[in-house]
Image: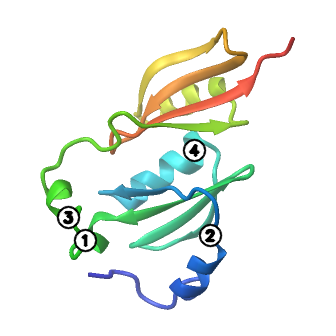
Amino acid sequence: MKKRTGEPFMPAPAYGATLSGLSVNLLVRDMDRALVFAREVLGAAVVYADADFAVLRHGGAKWMLHADHTYLDHPLHGSLAAGDARGVGAELRLHGCDPDAAQAAARAHGFTVLAGAMDKPHGLRECHILDDEGYVWAPDVPLRR
């Protein structure tokens, strides 16, 4: 069931033809809240957003959001209806996103900081933030040597 009114930013087949490599599509219960997280915590640019679908960008990374209601005819729908957290076992790393700023914004907007910003032995400063859907985001920047 689509809730969008008006035309999308481009026809779905045209957008699909632009995708290559690895594509990430996250399912969300509340599109507005997911967009707050993306913009305010991660500093992502909203390429396009409506009640059903969004395209986000940060640096060279792009990802999509689909509202749960757009998956009514999808095999995952039964899992979505259970209301469990999503993304268990997946860590979404956003390279070039300041972890200290993301951590502060997450706290200011009521999101959960799982692990505060710290320098790690693998050469990155990172933090781990949980969004409302249960996805774990790890904004990071290289350590200055």
> Could you tell me how far apart the alpha carbons at marks 2 and 1 are, in whole angstroms?
21 Å
Q: Position of residue 138 (x, y in %)?
A: 55, 31
User: Secondary structure beneath disc 4?
Assistant: helix
The amino acid at mark 3 is His
Q: Is residue 94 above or below residue 82?
A: above
* Residue highlighted by disc 2: 19
Of discs 4 and 3, which sits in the foreground? 3
The amino acid at mark 2 is Leu
Evaluate if marks 3 and 1 touch, with contact meaning CB atoms under 8 Å apart.
yes
User: Secondary structure beneath disc 3?
Assistant: helix
User: Secondary structure beneath disc 1?
Assistant: loop
Q: Is residue 75 above or below residue 142?
A: below
Which of 121 and 129 lies nearest the eye of the viewer?
121
Q: Is residue 72 above or below residue 76?
A: below
User: Where, quadrant-wise, is the C terminus in this rendering?
Assistant: top right
Chain-order first, disc 2 or disc 1: 2
The quarter holding residue 77 reads bottom left
* Residue highlighted by disc 1: 74
Of discs 4 and 1, which sits in the foreground? 1
Chain-order first, disc 4 or disc 1: 4
Which of 121 and 135 lies nearest the eye of the viewer?
121
* Residue highlighted by disc 3: 77
- Residue at (51% x, 84% y) in the render: 12
> Could you tell me how far apart the alpha carbons at marks 2 and 3 are, in whole angstroms?
24 Å
Q: Residues within 10 Å of mark 3 (few under 14, many from 20)?
A: some
Which of 2 and 13 lies nearest the eye of the viewer?
13
* Mark number displayed over residue 62: none
The quarter holding residue 17 reads bottom right
